[in-house]
Amino acid sequence: MEFVPLEIRWHGRGGYGAKTAALLLAEAVIEFGGFAQASPEFGPERRGAPVQAYTRISPQPVRRRGPVDNPDLLVLLDARLVGSPGVLDGVGPRTQVVLNAPGPVEVPGVAPERVLYLDASGIARRTVGREIPNVPLLAAVAVAFVGMPPGPFLRWLEKRLGRELPEEVARRNVEAARLALEEVQPWLRTGRLSTVGR
């Protein structure tokens, strides 16, 4: 499939899976024929500590390294991070934002139509049994913003997670991803999501 250049910055807390989501998205892009690079920003590994990670996607080999300073897409695995120092650095009027939140959250400097909120923690709690929001957000980003086809993406995710997780745990994570995509569909049908970078 064709990929457009896209720079993504993920913000989360230790234990929320931001680094894993960034890496899995890059793996998926490569699997589907694109080029990608993912890198975490290393800091305290303790649970609850702020974490950043980056994913760069391109139709050509990715040469640029280092932090994503001006993201096309900002993903917050905890909506409470909106007010944290540095989280909105480099965010402009063309940046799109994905929030782990059950309802709308105001993001300073970003028009409401460029914000997607998804109750990723709630989905994870109902399916996986733990509030780890990374897989629902990964699915939303992969399909709604990167443009991956839902069915093939979910099949890839099931195969990929099955390499590292017990079968039942992998299955529940894929169900979390599927439910996230169901919640994202109305946004796509109504055109609420603007095209990234435009």
Image: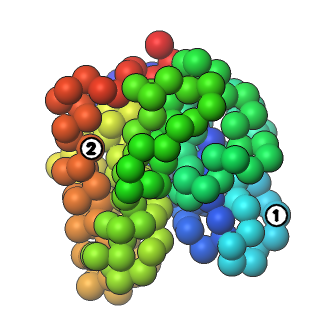
Q: Which residue is mark 1?
A: 43
Residues under labels 1 and 2: Cα distance? 32 Å
Check disc 2 and report its element: helix, strand or loop.
Answer: helix
Q: Is 3 in front, or is 189? A: 189
Q: How is the image coloured?
A: rainbow
Which residue is found at the position 23% from the left and 68% from the top? 175
Q: Residue 2's quadrant in the figure?
A: top left
| Coordinates of residue 96 in the picture (x, y in percent) | 50, 30
**Label whose residue precedes the other's in the sequence (1 or 2):** 1
Kindly indicate whether the residue at mark 2 contacts the one at mark 1 (C-beta within 8 angstroms): no
* Quadrant location, the N terminus: top left
From the image, state whether disc 1 or disc 2 is nearer to you: 2
Which residue is found at the position 34% from the left and 27% from the top? 193
| Coordinates of residue 7 in the picture (x, y in percent) | 59, 32
Residue that extends furthest to the top in the rendered view of this protein = 198
| Coordinates of residue 180 in the picture (x, y in percent) | 28, 55
Q: Is 82 in front, or is 20? A: 82
Q: Which mark is residue 184?
A: 2
Whether residue 39 is visible to the viewer of this picture, yes or no, is no
Q: Is 112 in front, or is 157? A: 112
Classify 17 as above or below 104: below
* Side of 79 where 171 appears, left or right: left
* Side of 102 where 183 appears, left or right: left
